[in-house]
Image (spheres, coloured by chain):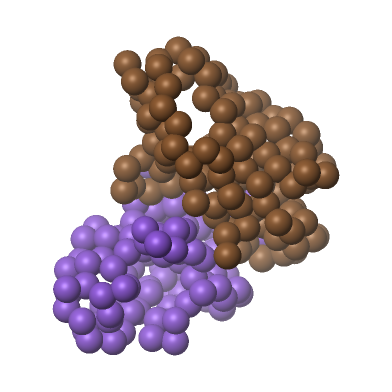
Amino acid sequence: DSGVTQTPKHLITATGQRVTLRCSPRSGDLSVYWYQQSLDQGLQFLIQYYNGEERAKGNILERFSAQQFPDLHSELNLSSLELGDSALYFCASSVLGTAQETQYFGPGTRLLVL
Amino acid sequence: SQQGEEDPQALSIQEGENATMNCSYKTSINNLQWYRQNSGRGLVHLILIRSNEREKHSGRLRVTLDTSKKSSSLLITASRAADTASYFCATYAGAGGTSYGKLTFGQGTILTVHP
């Protein structure tokens, strides 16, 4: 158990809908990352937050947005969902969010868009 | 495109044998990490090797890094059925300790260890 929690574990929804994925980092970690894992794209970095502020952005679509709240939990919002958004979404956390650190991954949220 | 490319894509061995997986990357790195993922589950960090290190050990794991060839290898000795998983290398690009934590993953090697 990494100490990173994600909810929900599974999510089934329809195209055009909007969903929110939630992540709680390990106790003491200030930085949160979001990744998407799909069969065709592999593991892709989406976005990183540090202490409530966006720090780095990857291949995140405009239909997707995220934020980190004062209690350090983070939410990833996916809107206008398409079939291709079906994937595993992982959250990870680390203490300071620097390149020297190990990232600890949560168990993921499996999203299926029908 | 992926920064890290693992080789082989799949590896099937018997329990007790050693498993070697290779990773190549394209740009200069700060460090390289290996992660394990059991089927459809979260990633587990295995080992981190910094760009100024050549070899690192952790239990039955041995990682090497050759920055001149932009490659790394992960050796699992005396493999067990429980080692069956996908293994990914991941890199931080960019120099300096303040580089932000964007990990770039390879496509992974699927390791199957038969009892």
In this rendering, would A12 be left or right of B102? left
Which x, y percent locates residue B68? Answer: 82, 44
Could you tell me which residue is drawn at 33 percent across and 47 percent down? B41
Which part of the image, by quadrant, shows the C terminus of chain A? bottom left
B97 to A69, vertically: above or below:
above
Q: Residue at x 78, y 34 (%)?
A: B54
Instruction: Examine the image and state in which quarter residue B48 appears.
Output: top right
Q: Residue at x 56, y 44 (%)?
A: B6
B74, A64: nearer the viewer: B74
Question: Can see residue B72?
Answer: yes
- In the picture, the quarter occupied by the N terminus of chain A is top left
Residue B75: x and y in percent read 59, 27
Give percent across and percent down for residue B86.
43, 40
Q: Is residue A29 toward the left or the right of residue A97 in the image?
A: left
The image shows a total of numbered marks equal to: 0
Confirm whether residue A100 shows in the render.
no
Q: Which chain is painted in purple?
A: A
Q: Which chain is brown?
A: B
Q: Is residue B25 above or below residue A21?
A: above
Q: Left or right: where does residue A46 sit relative to residue B48?
A: left
